Image (cartoon, rainbow, N blue to C red):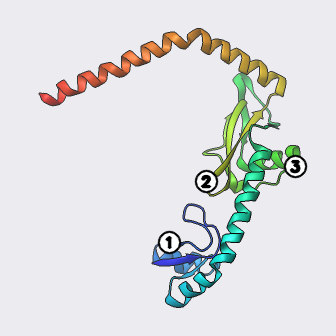
Amino acid sequence: MKVVLLSELKGKGGEGDIVDVAQGYAENYLFPKKLAVAATKGNLKQLEERRSNIEKREAARIEQAGALKAALEGKQVIVDAKVGDEGILFGSVTAAMIAEAIQKQLDVEIDRKRVELGKPIKVAGVHEVVIGLYRDIRASVEVLIGITAEEADEQAKAQLAKDAAEGPATDGADAEEAEQPSEAEPTASSE
């Protein structure tokens, strides 16, 4: 069923987009919440009349998302959490906790649903978290969990030194391993 979106719908599109969705999804979710209308001739005509206003709002949203990205990109946020032995957290750090920490420390309000966290974080340390600001505009924030900024810098330096020491030896071994299976596959398929 074709519908016209009245607001941004994650994974589907933005305001004014015509998308194809399941009829049950449209009738039971999108229409009652006024997120979309059916793509009838009358609604499509109204959409064309409102197109310039929609484009202005879209440009404003993109500009606002760009400003938020500039404010967030590369920043560090500290989330306090109780850490047990071996760096394992008591509980976990969720998207809501990260959004709250960003709001308190960077004074930027982010909806918890915008924090793209596959699953809650359960290990202390430095974690790279992506925040979806609008459509394909994303910002990356460094989240320090259970450690201070100084400890994070020390860990980063130690990791760089470790990578530099192991780097050339591991890359060569990986390249050899990658070549061997590709050579073995054609002989297995020819038999």
Tag 3 secondary structure? loop
Numbered label attached to residue 107: 3
Along the viewing direction, whichever of 65 and 102 lies nearer the viewer:
65
Callout 1, which amino acid?
A: Val
Disc on the earlier residue, 2 or 1: 1
Viewed as shown, does residue 190 lie left or right of 47?
Answer: left
Q: State the residue lying farthest toward the bottom.
A: 42
Callout 3, which amino acid?
A: Asp
Is residue 161 placed above or below 65 in the rendered structure? above
Q: Do labels 2 and 1 touch, CB within 8 Å? A: no
Tag 1 secondary structure? strand
The part of the image, by quadrant, that contains residue 180 is: top left
Is residue 77 placed above or below 181 in the rendered structure? below
What quarter of the picture does the N terminus occupy?
bottom left
Going 70% across and 64% down the picture, which residue do you hit? 59
Callout 2, which amino acid?
A: Asp
Tag 2 secondary structure? loop
Measured in 3D between alpha carbons, the distance from the residue under mark 2 to the one under mark 3, in whole angstroms, is: 23 Å
| Residue behind mark 1 | 19
Is residue 142 placed above or below 118 in the rendered structure? above
Going 44% across and 13% down the picture, which residue do you hit? 172
Q: State the residue lying farthest toward the front.
A: 52
